[in-house]
Image (tube, helix red, strand yellow):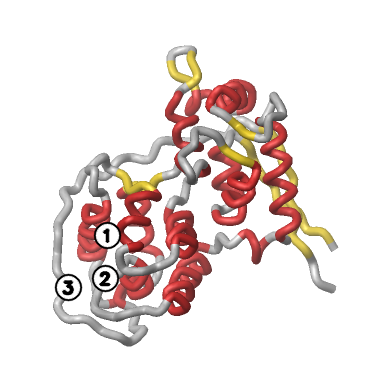
Amino acid sequence: MASRSGVLVALSESSTSESESITMDAVVSESNGSSNDDKNLSSLLNPQELLQTADSIFDTMDTNHDGSISNEELRTHLARIGYSPESIRLLFTALDKNADGVISREEMRFAFETYEVSSLYKAFGVGDEDLTEEMYSATVESIRSSADMDSSKKTAPELVTKLADLIFNMIDTDNSGEIDGDELKLHFMKHGDFSTFREVGHVSTISVESVMKALDLNDDGVISREEMRNGFRQYDLEALSKALGLQVTKTSEM
């Protein structure tokens, strides 16, 4: 009998810990030659070379040098090659593991240490190989599959939509159909992890800005219901829920 994944939402204080920042200087390296086969390049590179490759690509895309790659920076870089905004967005959400709206250097390094390097090269437009949109989408899909994060495959789409609507309605306290910064602050005061979302007795604007970066793709200063739904379709359910100060528990429905 087929089983279907379900989701339950529970409010909880999540115990997060700050990971140590890595301070290795970026080393920009050129790869000698290119290969069009699907050979696993990670087997040809030692750990130090993998980090150097990750840092080289990261520094190329971090055009404003703020230490992170925004959705706009990734989209600008890859759109020049001709890839669709939808595929680029799916790549972005696969790499933004904590759903804070940016790709950090550590997240880029994690990707190169964990996923198929040849797929990452193709996804970032490294090398001479020209990919059709169909081939590029398949490459991004392989990365998302390696990350084990496609909500549409792990959880029924209608349940993902219900979860997004439940959380949206919880935060949209004035029932305006949009979530603004003040509503997010109020939400974090009630449900957020105060070690992360409160500074010196005041709600941190950092958490609000992070959620806005992750979900407000048209930069109009509010999150619409559809933007919330798209976020839950694109991001890992647990990661996005945690970023919103909530915990998702999966159940199995027969």
> Residue 16, image x and y in percent?
49, 36
Identify which residue is drawn at 70% across, 32% down: 170
Going by the numbered disc 2, the residue's amino acid type is Val
- Tell me whether the residue at label 2 lies in contact with that at label 3, contact meaning CB atoms closer than 8 angstroms: yes
Quadrant hosting residue 68: top left
| Residue beneath the point at 49% across and 30% down | 208
Up-down relation of residue 38 to residue 60 (above or below): below
Mark 1 secondary-structure assignment: helix
Q: Residues within 10 Å of mark 3 (few under 14, many from 20)?
A: few
Residue 54: mark in rendering: 1
Q: Could you tell me the amino acid type at mark 1?
A: Ala
Numbered mark located on residue 206 in the image: none
Q: Is residue 182 above or below residue 63?
A: above
Tell me, for residue 31, which label it has, or none. 3
Query: How would you rate the neighbour count of disc 2 (Cα within 10 Å): few for under 14, some for 14-19, many for 20 or more?
Result: some
In this image, 40 relative to 45: left or right?
Answer: right
Where residue 81 sits in the image (x, y, percent)? 31, 68
Q: Earlier in the sequence, mark 2 or mark 3?
A: 3
Residue 203 x/y as whole percent: 50, 19
Image quadrant containing the N terminus:
bottom right
Q: Which mark is residue 126?
A: 2
Along the viewing direction, whichever of 97 and 169 lies nearer the viewer: 169
Q: CA distance from mark 2 to mark 3?
A: 10 Å
Secondary structure of residue under mark 2? loop
Position of residue 76 in the picture relative to residue 200 (left or right): left
Seen as rendered, the residue at the extreme bottom is: 37
Residue found at x 58% / y 46%: 227
